[in-house]
Amino acid sequence: MFPRAALARHGQHIPKSCQTVGSSRRLATAASGTFSYETGESAGVKFASRDLPGPTTHLAVVAKAGTRFQPLPGFADGLEKFAFKNTFKRSALRITRESELLGGELSAYHSRENLVLSTKFLRDDLPYFAELLGEVIAQTKFTGHELHEEVNAVIDLSRKSLLKNTTEFAINSVHGVAFHRGLGNPLYPSSSTPMTKYLQEDLLRQYSQAAYAKNNFAVVANGANHQDLSKWVGQFFTESPASPPPDFPIPGSSPSKYYGGEERVAHDSGNTMILAFPGSSSFTGGSYKPEMAVLSALLGGQSNIKWSPGFSLLSKATAANPQVHVLTTHHTYSDAGLLTVSMSGNARQVREVSQQVVTALKNTAVGKVSSEDIKKARAMAKFKALESGQNIDTGIELTGAGLVQGGKAFQIDEVGKGMDGVTEDQVKKAAKALLDGKASVSTVGDLYVLPFAEEIGLNV
């Protein structure tokens, strides 16, 4: 195995100061152990770090380049798949071999708002992986043969895998019904999307200049010293443009607007019905409402306690329909949210459960819910929020998105305080507002049996 010094010497000529950092092994004793992020800016790039105890580091670039902001179908997926491919300095093979020699992990994924390029490695190898990420976002080649032979092939496989997944189908559908464009764009292109018409290497290269402009991404680290991170960000992230090209407009920048409505799709691979309502933005957004998370926990559907049906309203109400999987989820975004109740399984039982969901909302709105259940829901919502923020992967995306879109890092202590302040009256008012407004309903499966929104008492 090549020593780390050899990689620096034969690779990107990392300066001696980098090797000095690598020679003094700073492990858990150098970490502060706090779960709050320390933020800063270096060379025009926003960054945040948590110096967690331990011998490893998780470093990521979080770009505002999810499907909401893509100019054409498949561009978010294309940027994700091109991560860690050939650059103007290194081949994809060399990147792979060097990362393997250092024991690192490389990955990428996208959500509706963000594109995350992630690296995990031993703590002392921060300079190498900081340089690698800076190189990937600024100097990827976007060659035609990689697009046609590798990237498109992987995208096609993921598109085919979604054909039989009625739940994913319905999630994309209900977002489209709720928001139309922007947040309504499907997370992955459908099998019928004419990808070759849109996804071209020249256009993707142009889009990367906008997606990876300095004001459009943030660097976030867990397990890294703040001063060290500032130093390497300032040294290795200098080649990205300061702002997006003026001749390449980025859609999705206007505030999200909720519409509501209904879509029904016949499908013979299963049955899924999703009832959705306007929710709260993320903590770092401008319309954060912690009571929506509490209402989501109160509705529930799945138990977190083994051998117990759980306290949630839907887990109790649906006990007689074991062939239906029910799950309430609160999807949060930078300026909007979507509370969804997903029901999958036997068509006739899904029909029955959908009526029980509306009944549970009505009971909550008029106060026919015990104070103890609301107290349990508040505790559950707080736990889930804090666990999500403490989770390294989730915390990195939330923090990066907060820095880019609002200049504010995700701080789990403040989230916990917000949950503690939610009252029973706030939860009741939230439920009533959902019923009085327009719902978004997506139904996929046996349409002869599955109900229309109007039949179960919802306004669309």
Image: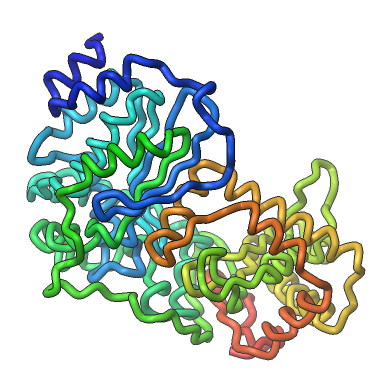
Nearer to me, 219 or 370: 219
At a point 45% along the width and 57% down the height, the residue shown is: 164
Tell me the quarter of the image containing the C terminus: bottom right
Give the side of residue 42 with respect to residue 262, left or right.
left
Residue 251 found in image quarter? bottom left
Residue 66 found in image quarter? bottom left
At a point 70% along the width and 74% down the height, the residue shown is: 354
At a point 48% along the width and 47% down the height, the residue shown is: 38
Q: How is the image coloured?
A: rainbow
Residue 14, position as x, y percentages in the image: 18, 26
Residue 455, position as x, y percentages in the image: 68, 87
Residue 129 vs 287, above or below: the answer is above
Can residue 361 be seen? yes
Q: Residue furthest top?
A: 1
Residue 36 vs 360, above or below: the answer is above
At a point 66% along the width and 63% down the height, the residue shown is: 328
